[in-house]
Amino acid sequence: MSKLTVRLTMAQAVARFLTRQMTVIDGKTVPIFGGVFAIFGHGNVAGLGEALHGVRDELPTYRGQNEQGMANAAIAFAKASFRQRFMACTTSIGPGALNMVTSAALAHVNRLPVLLLPGDVFANRRPDPVLQQMEDFGDGTMTVNDCFRPVSRYFDRITRPEQIIPALRRAMQVLTDPAECGPVTLSLCQDVQAEAYDYPESFFEERLWTVRRPEPDAGELAQAIAAIRAARRPVIIAGGGVLYSQASPALAAFAETHGIPVMETQAGKSSLPHDHALNMGSVGVTGTSASNRLAEEADLVLAVGTRLQDFTTGSWALFKDEDVAIVGLNVQAFDAGKHEALPLVADARVGLEALSAALAGHRFDPSWTGKATEGKAEWIAAADRATAATNAALPSDAQVIGAVQRACAGRKTTLVCASGGLPGELHKLWQAVAPGSYHMDYGFSTMGYEIAGGLGVKLAKPDDDVVVMVGDGSYLMLNSELVSAIMLGAKLTVVLLDNSGYGCINRLQMATGGANFNNLLKDTQNVELPAIDYAAHAAALGAVTRKVSSISDLEAALQEMASETRSTVIVIDTDPLITTDAGGHWWDVAVPEVSVRPTVNAARTAYEKALDAQRFG
């Protein structure tokens, strides 16, 4: 190893290191970091800010408008890149850093890579307490950045310049490991950012990172094969791991060869084209009738790349067969063994190929796939009815989805959403045509992700039409990265559904027997209801906007504004109470045992009955 060194500040070493990390995509070597989102303040402007300026031609720096928003955009970039590339984010100390904690949790839950570089207090402690420093009366080492510890896969605080060498190496291992993948936080003390050190030149040598594809253990594979061969009514649940492994062709081949119906989680939706004969669509609480009917009868579930969260399993009440077996094909052992599953710890693509090879010649009874085909035809008819255009004064979310789908037909579109009632409707009704064309944060269901997420998707997929669907509540929480999209010329098409409040939670409140309270604007404590003009607001941020009053007008506006080069925002008023009745499943939301309200008591009785169907293991 060369003993040559180069004298750099710690921040300069960070910036140079990031420019030297590479990956291979479609046979081409490209930088693994797509850029750095930054909001500068004291704690990072003098150190990392100066360092990023020095590498701006190799590593682009993007100015965010809100720390949570920019981190959400960075996370969306990684998701849209199938975790092959990712970004870094840097903030000042104090509130700037804390604004990213929610995003760190979002990335952690969704197993998505992002490098967070918040500024921190002075390591030398001479100016203590520095502006924005939180003081812990019993721990002199504590800062607000310790809040990142439980929501980071790897956390480190850099108090000496040479510490960045092992820290960055460890960071890259985590960011590129398909099992450990998640947020990394390196808390950078602001004085140390500016300190110089003689770094070994070898630290800055170009490094190529490739996707690790673990093969299954022979014993686990044998157990999985035996369980699958013994089954009569198997189903496959495809999660996000299918997409991250780019295993869609392998999944299609496996399902077709062996005659097994496939159903998709929120993260796994688009694993197969919506019109694939064996794709039953969404599963669970927001599932299609086709998927859920089969899941209830299944005697084996092959869970591929999914963490089996409660929306997928109907709060573990969906699977009705008492002897149902689960095979957990997952690169992460923690997920593979959930609920007494037979674990098959492996890369999704490699695992499916190994299973198929071992099952050569084994095909399940055609009557099972025939039942799946019949159920899918019934579901498609129900979905078409839900999304059909009508002349209703206030259309449903489903009707808006239908209009957007029709207007985008034939275009290379990626749909982005995150929270509220829309994810459930989109999970059921959106017709995804290509892997990754459906982009949803429903692992953390983060309100405010939508527009920032759309920006990240557009940076990752500049040739796609990126359509963001967002409710008025989520838009109010975080719309500022619309400015970033306009600044960067990253065109988004935003469809804003205004139901005058938090319509989804209002419906849940009603379903659990509660009174309409504090969700819709009309049900809040208020002196005067605000007359919010969302189109005018978005126009003031620089977007091209339009307010439409009908489904036909929405379709026309989407087609007319497709040629716009700036981001567009189309606003339509919707009904807060209507949701698609077809499909779906019970979801465990605890109802009070004691109430003076008869509606709550009735809901509690129904809730206790539903609990009888829950599995526990």
Image (cartoon, rainbow, N blue to C red):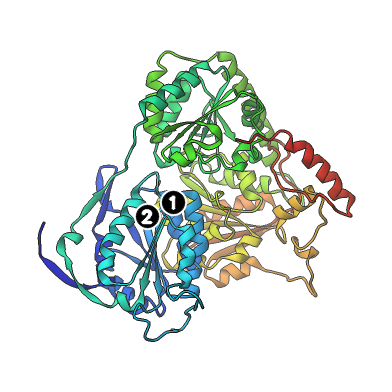
Query: Nearer the observer, disc 2 or disc 1?
Result: 1
Q: Position of residue 217 (x, y in %)?
A: 36, 29
Q: Position of residue 482 (x, y in %)?
A: 51, 65
Q: Which mark is residue 403?
A: none
- Counting labels gives 2
Q: Is residue 57 visible?
A: no
Q: Position of residue 21 (x, y in %)?
A: 26, 56
User: Which residue occupies the foreground of this view, 270 or 348?
Assistant: 348
Q: Residue at x 46, y 45 (%)?
A: 412
Placement of the N terminus among the 4 image quadrants: bottom left
The quarter of the picture where residue 557 lies is bottom right
Determine whether, in the image, residue 192 is placed left or right of residue 225. Answer: left
Q: Residues within 10 Å of mark 1 (few under 14, many from 20)?
A: many
Q: Residue at x 57, y 46 (%)?
A: 407
> Quick one: label 2 or label 1, which is nearer the N terminus?
2
Determine whether, in the image, residue 584 is placed left or right of residue 73. Answer: right
Determine whether, in the image, residue 92 is placed left or right of residue 569. Answer: left
The type of residue carrying mark 2 is: Phe
Disc 2 and disc 1 in contact, CB within 8 angstroms: yes
The type of residue carrying mark 1 is: Leu
Q: Which mark is residue 112?
A: 1
User: Which residue occupies the foreground of this view, 61 or 537?
Assistant: 61
Vertical relation: 357 (above or below) 213 = above
Q: In the structure shown, which secondary structural element does the residue marked by tag 1 occupy?
A: loop
Which residue in the structure is indicated by mark 2? Answer: 86
Q: Is residue 413 visible?
A: yes
Q: In the structure shown, which secondary structural element does the residue marked by tag 2 occupy?
A: strand
User: Which residue occupies the foreground of this view, 110 or 414?
Assistant: 110
**Cα distance between the residues tagged 2 and 1:** 9 Å
Placement of the C terminus among the 4 image quadrants: top right
